[in-house]
Amino acid sequence: MTMKNNGTRATVAAICAAVVNRRGYSYVHDFTANSSRHVTIKVNDNKVDAYDYAASASIDGSVPGDLYHYGENTHIEMKISNNKVEGFHYGSSDFYEATVSGTSVEFYDFGTSNFYFYEVS
């Protein structure tokens, strides 16, 4: 699985919202794929603990810095600047950029050259 996988991308977008808003979330809705995903995301200081139920995988680490996706066995880099998150998914060698506005996330995946839109709750 790579960032080209809608589920992985949705979960990373939800983590972006959580780190920008400094709070946890339980669901992410993918408007592009018209589907919802159950996740658990907790943010404490710069530490992220997340679980993607559909992938049965944990993702954790520090932001800014490096997260590890245990389901994909890969690292995900994440840097924050105000409401923007930039990063790199090492499994697919793709950069991404997310802009968070409240609970909405506009996500650009450089690997697919497309925008994706999400809402977290």
Image (spheres, grey):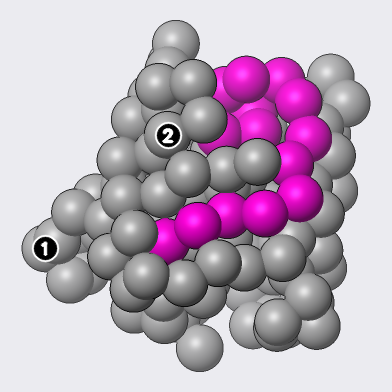
- The crowd level at tag 2 (other Cα within 10 Å; few <14, some 14-19, many 20+) is some
Q: Which residue lies at the image location 37% right of the left edge and 70% below the top edge? A: 34
Q: Is residue 61 visible?
A: no
Counting every numbered tag in the picture gives 2
In the rendered structure, does residue 19 fall within the stretch colored magenta? yes
Q: Secondary structure at mark 1?
A: loop
The numbered dot on residue 104 is 2
* Residue 107 point in image, percent of width and height: 31, 47
Q: Secondary structure at mark 2?
A: strand
Q: Which residue lies at the image location 65% right of the left edge and 41% below the top edge? A: 121
62 lies above or below 71: above
Which residue carries the number 1 mark?
Answer: 113
* Residue 88 point in image, percent of width and height: 41, 54
Q: CA distance from mark 1 to mark 2?
A: 20 Å
Q: Amino acid at mark 1?
A: Ser
Q: Nearer the viewer, residue 34 or 65?
A: 34
Q: Nearer the viewer, mark 1 or mark 2?
A: 2
- The crowd level at tag 1 (other Cα within 10 Å; few <14, some 14-19, many 20+) is few
Label whose residue precedes the other's in the sequence (1 or 2)? 2
Q: Which residues are magenta?
A: 17-30
Q: Nearer the viewer, residue 55 or 25?
A: 25
* Residue 112 point in image, percent of width and height: 17, 71
- Left or right side of 74 for 57: right
Direction bottom: furthest residue: 1
In the rendered structure, does residue 63 fall within the stretch colored magenta? no
* Residue 19 point in image, percent of width and height: 64, 29
Q: Amino acid at mark 2?
A: Ser
- Left or right side of 12 for 104: left
